[in-house]
Image (tube, rainbow, N blue to C red):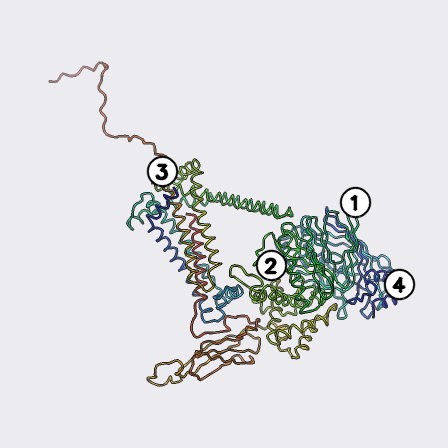
Amino acid sequence: MVGAGWSLVWRRQRLLWWLYLVSLVMGWFAAQPLVATISPVLDHSLEAGHLYHGFDLATFAGLMMNPGASTPAPGTAATWLGVIFLVLMILLTGGILRVYNEDRTYATSEFFGACGQYFWRFVRLLIFLLLVLIAPALVYSGSYAWSNHLADRIASPTPGLVVGFGGTLIVLFLLMSIRLWFDMAEVHAVAENEYASRRALASAFRLTRRNFGSLFWMYFRVSFLAWAGTVLGLWVWAKFVPPEGLKRSFLITQAIIFLWILTRLWQRASETLWYQAHAPVPELIPEAYSTYQPEPAVTEPGPEPPPAAVSL
Amino acid sequence: MRHSTVMLLSAGVFAVAVNAAAQTAPAGSKPLSTRVVAYQIDARLNPANKTVDATETLTYRNLTGQPQQTFPFHLYLNAFQPQSTFMTEVRRGGTRGTGPDQGWDPKHYGSIEIRSLAVDGMGDLTRQLQFTQPDDHNADDHTVVQVTLPKPVAPNADVTFRIVFHDQLPEVVERTGYKRDFYMIGQWFPKVGVWWKGAWNCHQFHSTSEFFADFGTFDVKVTVPRNYLTGAAGDLVSQEDNPDGTKTLRYRSEDVHDFSWTASPEFTDVEDSWEGSAGTVKIHLLTSPGHLKQAQRYIDCVKGTLEMFQRWYGVYPYDRITVVDPPEGGSDAGGMEYPTLITGDSGWFVPDGLKLIELVTEHEFGHQYWYGMVATDEFEEAWLDEGINSYTEAKVMDALYGKGRSAIDIAGATIDDAGTQRLSYLGVADTDPLTHFAYQFISSSAYDGITYGKTATVLLTLEGIIGEDTMRNAMHTYFERYKFTHPTGTDFLKTIEDVSGQDLSWYFDQAVSGTNVLDYEVLTIRSDRADWYVKNPPPEKKGQTTYRDQVLVHRKGDFIFPTETEVRFDNGETVREKWDGRDRWVRYEYVKKAKVVSAEVDPDHKVRLDKDFFNNSQTADANNKATNKLAIYWMFLTQLGNQLVAWLM
């Protein structure tokens, strides 16, 4: 299914490129306030060489403390762009899943029509997701508190670390499982044109629970690829790219972002195909016709009719 | 007057004094310091109650030149109480630790109680004890107690105090206390003040101040459970097991002014040694569970620092150095210095490129010189120990771990020790002079930034004025002149002037006693065609067109400092201009067949005290490579953030 998912992503690669382009453009917009802030301080200063030929943290910290460069504008812009990106993803996910579900080329208007069709359903699903995420948050705070408690009580750091690491793994597992459940709910909502979020969640929950092993393995493999690719990319960046290699830095960092988008779409495509292959066939309910049904003919003698007036 | 002669002249406490001398000055060895105090302490640790019960015999030699009748004592552990001056200051401005900053917790309660005090020949004077608050008159502060004797102690006479005291240890806070079964016992016994500048110097314990005491000898017995491993600021001279499952260890230390010890059943003792000019120095590293893999980093740093200090500043005269590695959760005991014993800071994982272990170890070892031997007053002139030590830390760290990357060197991101010192000063550049008393700074961050960071930066800048070799020579002379004494800031500055042969008062007045901010900038550079008035001038040709070049340098701050400016032209020519910096600005003008490419104040980067390095230079053409680099990084971070947020969908 993972292979088929990859094929589907490849066949519908326009989605991938467009999503990456959106991410790139938003990243560019996020960088502009920073450029506007630091450019007047750096561009005519020889001190900037300490940031270009290496990355001197003292110079960087000095820049952050410089009255000319220490404004909240870059952070504010990045925050707002993050919110916009989330809204955009809520909008686009419906269209993406429809394309994967039907595996055909959509015209632009048709695609955005599909996006709009599912927007509010997916907003409701997001709200449910935020509620469900309270559970892993509680697990995390519990394991954190337990880890701290052990670290406080036991001289060896090992038990505290084991609990902390174990807690993190459990939380990661929970987060992935929850994401998988909600992914399936979204796939279900699109495939079945399900309006009711709770019904979609309930159906997806049953489906995910019954097939958890295969679904999780499918989701995990692709996630792992994203993590491994990120670590590899960062390692190559730190190890082989000289401080002055701006183009190479740009390419590697963008490759990592591209990998994240690719693997997420890959998960979506695999989940859609899996759903098509394994979703329970809905029970057929005979339609209730409302056409006129003639009364059955009287076969037994009924009560004697009243004497009728004889007409001629 | 030699030590033994003084004792022969002493009356009344003659026998005790001779006994103390016999214990602390081996025959034939000449004391390194003027020994004013001789402490004999017998202490027993009670792990169940986190207490220490002890008896202390203190013999004080009155070398003040006048009769003394009132004696003040530090009771530092009483600082760890809600109404103390220390806690009041912590509430106001934080402290170096993490414990009580989060609010009062009874586990941080600590106390020291004098159960009895008697003076030889004068009887029991326990009832004469009075708490006193010389700094802030906070009646609830019990960190200083004084006793008035029935009769004065004559000049050059000895007086012996016999004290029984009881310590309640806090969970580790501000250098001292326990964490589980780890004990760091510092500032734990009644310690007499220092007669200093014609008065008793015995300050209360403050959130930012440290300590000050007279040199002398310590003969200390500690009794701990038999399975505990101990370390102390002295040579172990005997050890015996007791029938009650405990053991008693006896330590002796001479020509020091404090004594601390540590105990834990969880320690691993890693031993090594270093051959110095004064003989072999034994290195004891007491590591905590999970930290053993960091041992070699500690050892390498101690050895490297010993080597550099001996080469640059002077001989390490002691035969030992003990490094205590506090356990997880006990880091408030870390990063502290005592004579011949220091506490470090590490963890189960510290990347090689993060020189945290080395920074702390080097710094605390450096205090063996700047505090331990050159025993300045940490209450009133903290810059002389913490600041000078931060300066030598920057020098030694650079020598051992590489200039430009001696603090952090991870994945291409670097910073050196001098850089961290300067950063800590930048945020508080104009708040306090170096010379403020430690507890009189506007905030604890100002105390840190000025005392450590600014002092180091001031001295690094001073190197640029008098030369690195001269500065090193001055530091060496300062150490040799004042080791085992209590010099002042004036002594230090005068030594630098003596060695350099320069009158540096113009610099010290601004950098040490003042709060002047040093900031020079290249305000403008421009190149105008000389034939600007010609109606149809010939096209500009490199090397042929004549320009009027101008460079305007501006003194932004109020710190007057002679500067050098390097002007570069597009024909490769370079000009260096000198300016005394007294006026607010200076303009350099040239008529050349070349345009100005750039101008830079302090082109050799000697003036570390300059608050803003970015405005020190200006280039004619914009170069946005650094901006683009940061933009690429920021873009990546925001895109990654967006992807994480999009995970919600």
Q: Amino acid at mark 3?
A: Ala
Q: Are marks 2 and 4 on the same chain?
A: yes
Tag 3 and tag 4, C-beta contact below 8 Å: no
Under circle 1, the secondary element is: loop
Q: How dense is the environment of label 3, judged by Cα within 10 Å: few (below 14), some, or many (20 and up)?
A: few
Which-is-in-front pick, marks 3 and 4?
Answer: 3
Extreme residue toward the left, this view: A312
> What amino acid is found at the position of numbered circle 4 in the picture?
Gly
The residue under label 2 is B356
Crowd band around label 2 with a 10 angstrom C-alpha radius: few (<14), some (14–19), many (20+): some
Which quadrant of the view contains residue B346? bottom right
Q: Which residue type carries mark 2?
A: Leu
Q: Which mark is residue A277?
A: 3
| The N terminus of chain B, quarter of image | bottom right
The residue to which callout 4 is attached is B12
Q: Label 2, secondary structure: give it.
A: helix
Q: Quadrant of residue B245?
A: top right
Q: CA distance from mark 4 to mark 1?
A: 38 Å
Q: CA distance from mark 2 to mark 4?
A: 53 Å
Q: Give the alpha-carbon distance from disc 3 to disc 4, as whole Å.
A: 104 Å
Mark 1, residue position: B244
Q: Earlier in the sequence, mark 2 or mark 1?
A: 1
Q: Earlier in the sequence, mark 2 or mark 4?
A: 4
Sequence order check: which comes first, mark 4 or mark 1? 4
In this rendering, is residue A308 above or below A40?
Answer: above
